[in-house]
Image (cartoon, coloured by chain):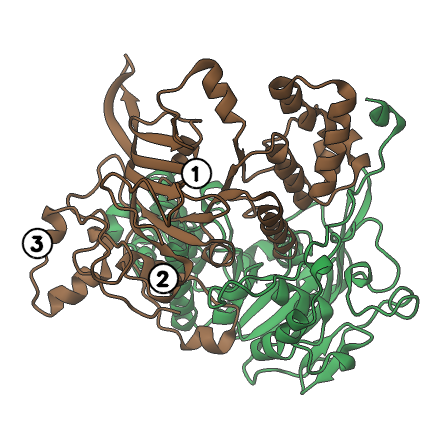
Amino acid sequence: MSEVTTSPIEPVVDGEAPLLVATDLVKDFPIRGGVLGRTIGVVSAVAGVSLAVKRRETLGLVGESGCGKSTTGRMLLDLISPTAGEVLFDGLSLTRTSGKDLSKVRRRFQIVFQDPYASLNPRMTVGATLAEPLKFHFGWKDAQIAARVRELLTIVGLSPEHANRFPHEFSGGQRQRVGIARALALEPELIVLDEPVSALDVSIQAGIVNLLERLQEDLGLAYVFIAHDLSVVRHISDRVAVMYLGKIVEEGTRDEIYGRPGHPYTQALLSAVPLPDPRREQARERIILRGDVPSPANPPSGCRFRTRCWKKLEVEAQGVDTSACSEREPLLDAATVGHPVACHFTATRDVL
Amino acid sequence: MTLTPASTQEVLLSVRDLVAKFTTEDGVVQAVDGVSFDVHRGEVFAIVGESGSGKSVTAMTILGLIPTVEVDRGEILWKGRDLVTLSEEERRKVRGGEIAMIFQDPLTALNPVHTIGRQIGEMARIHDGLDKKRAFERAVEMLDLVGIPEARKRAKMYPHEFSGGMRQRAMIAMAICCKPDLLIADEPTTALDVTVQAQVLEVLLDIKDEIDSGIVLITHDLGVVAGLADQVMVMYAGRQVEMGTTEEIFYESRHPYTLGLLASLPRLDDEGEEPLLPITGSPPSLIRRPPGCPFHPRCRFAELPGLCDTEVPELRLVAGDSHRAACHYAETLEGVSVDSLRANVDVDELLAVEGVGPTVVSAEEAGA
């Protein structure tokens, strides 16, 4: 198991150097206002995120809308440049590399987006879409490209004849297969999957999840799987990081996060997911969070979760002093429950 | 067809053999095809299905909200009166006053240029004839009821000043403003985060008891159904394929589609190693339906060739006094469970591909 904390990461995880290492990533988006469009504030979308992904491993990145998971995913691939922090891909710093070297390393990591319709060019056939990166990065001849396009379509479960079709001729699940084929075209080592099955019906979703698992096994891929659906994440991930308001609040193996969650937010999140099982579902005790996620333009002091935290209220009711929650930011610490949790009052709780 | 009452409570809504269609450039879409069900006071009646199953069109047709949808056949009995034959004016009185709707996306359903309080109060002004001031007071009371803090202050705010969860509460406040007998909630929490979904569902259940109404809950989320519903109707390609109590549907399903949905779903309380069984192929086009059972091209139990691809199965009683399924072989599914399906799966099945696209490639495109 890797121990990722906000301190500089360990260079070696389980004896194997991680493929991707992100250290203290920060992203602030300016808020512009007034007639001159001056910067009048910043939205702190990601506020110091560190993580590592090994080869052949799936890291699940979960959290609710606006928690910064997608921004983090894009920074990992240098699609958005971080305000601070560094991303190392196979030892090479993306933040400090540019030009030809960057272009060369870029083909080793790819992204699959949520909406396969919006991310495919409607005027290009699927074959042309898949051929483009091959032409650009490899400079292949037409015949070689055509052969690879046929192969890619077959790998993702489509048939080679589909190359002549346009995106609108496919169903949602098939379009997502095209999106995956495009990501695979350059034989990447890592793929960031940003809500890849969220737009699909459940009966179709299962096929895509199974395909992703098969591809990982066959091609030795590493995944960063970004999703808000905690059930899918449990199914596909080896390790899971939970984000809240721009920070990772808990990180661990799948069994640790789902079996022994230590952070009050993780616990509330898991308890809120309904189970498709009436007897169990109706017998469950749900932690209902009050209020909404605070604005990332003006995050709470100390612990960012404290304004909605049920645990804080619980321990206050027992007469415990909780001033630490608003005064000191809790750091990720594995001391209490065995995996990193950022809470002053860490304790496990069974929520399923 | 007569249905055995599943509850001793008063029947509010009774839909009988409803057939509704709309016309598109490509042909006539049979969106709802012979649907019958009853909703009782105090009950949560869930309509479950995937995109294009006809669940939303069914709800919209009850309210007469889509002008392009034509009702071909059937009755929508509301407290004994057939809504289909009512004039638009009479229908409008029922809509909002007696039956209210909660939509999926509150930002598009709310008017951005009026305050929340005014929009909620408008319902009371139209249906209960309150004046402006009293309507505003009613709005404040309703916002308070759905758990919005500082309701009086919030009532003067505009929709963009509300968060997603608060907007959905405001929608609920608007829907319950005239104490309707029936709430139709169309994917009420689909656009929300899970922690906010939990808040909103809690409000919805409390409200139901508070105003003693019934709820028609339309959703694709089987988890939400499991937690909330009393009765469940599963729809596929515009037809009802299974109907029963929530326990019957989840634990003793007698339809291959329902079983397929349950087996394709990853569960939070699974260890993560269980195989997910996709349903092969894609839902059929509602313009050109397959012959026989609409589910037969995707069905793992279909006997082909045979009854499945020649005769449309009728919804019939298969167990107990209200458990119905539309499958020729429903009896053979007794004892089939998600676990038994998963135990007998082979690897190829897991990688099953959804069907080939709906259109034919033209010569022009093929040469492109």
- First reached walking from the N terminus: tag 1 or tag 3: 1
Whether callout 1 and callout 2 share a subunit is answered yes
**Residue at the extreme front of the image, as rendered:** A15
Label 1 resides on the chain identified as A
Mark 1 highlights which residue? Answer: A19
N-term mark: 2 or 3: 2
Q: Which residue is mark 3?
A: A323
Residue appearing at x 83%, y 75% in the figure: B328
Expressed as whole percent of the image width and height from the top left, the position of residue B223 reads 51, 65
Label 2 is found on which chain of the structure? A
Which residue position holds label 2? A256
Q: Tag 2's secondary structure? A: helix
At label 3, the amino acid type is Ser
Q: Mark number for residue B240?
A: none
Callout 2 environment at 10 Å: few (<14), some (14 to 19), or many (20+)? some
How much space separates mark 1 and mark 3, taking CA atoms? 40 Å
How far is the residue under mark 2 from the one under mark 3? 28 Å
Amino acid type at mark 2: Glu
Which numbered disc flags the more N-terminal residue, 1 or 2? 1
Mark 1 surroundings within 10 Å by alpha-carbon count, few (fewer than 14), some (14 through 19), many (20 or more): some
Can you say whether B362 is above or below B199 in the image? Answer: above
Q: Is residue B206 above or below residue A330?
A: below
Left or right: A60, with A145 as reference point: left
Kindly indicate whether the residues beneath marks 2 and 3 are on one polypeptide chain. Answer: yes
Q: Chain of mark 3?
A: A
Q: Which image quarter: residue B324? A: bottom right
- The one nearer the camera, B52 or A2, is A2
The chain assigned the colour green in the figure is B
Residue at image coords 77%, 32%: A163
Determine the CA span between mark 1 and mark 2: 22 Å
Chain letter for the part of the structure drawn in brown: A
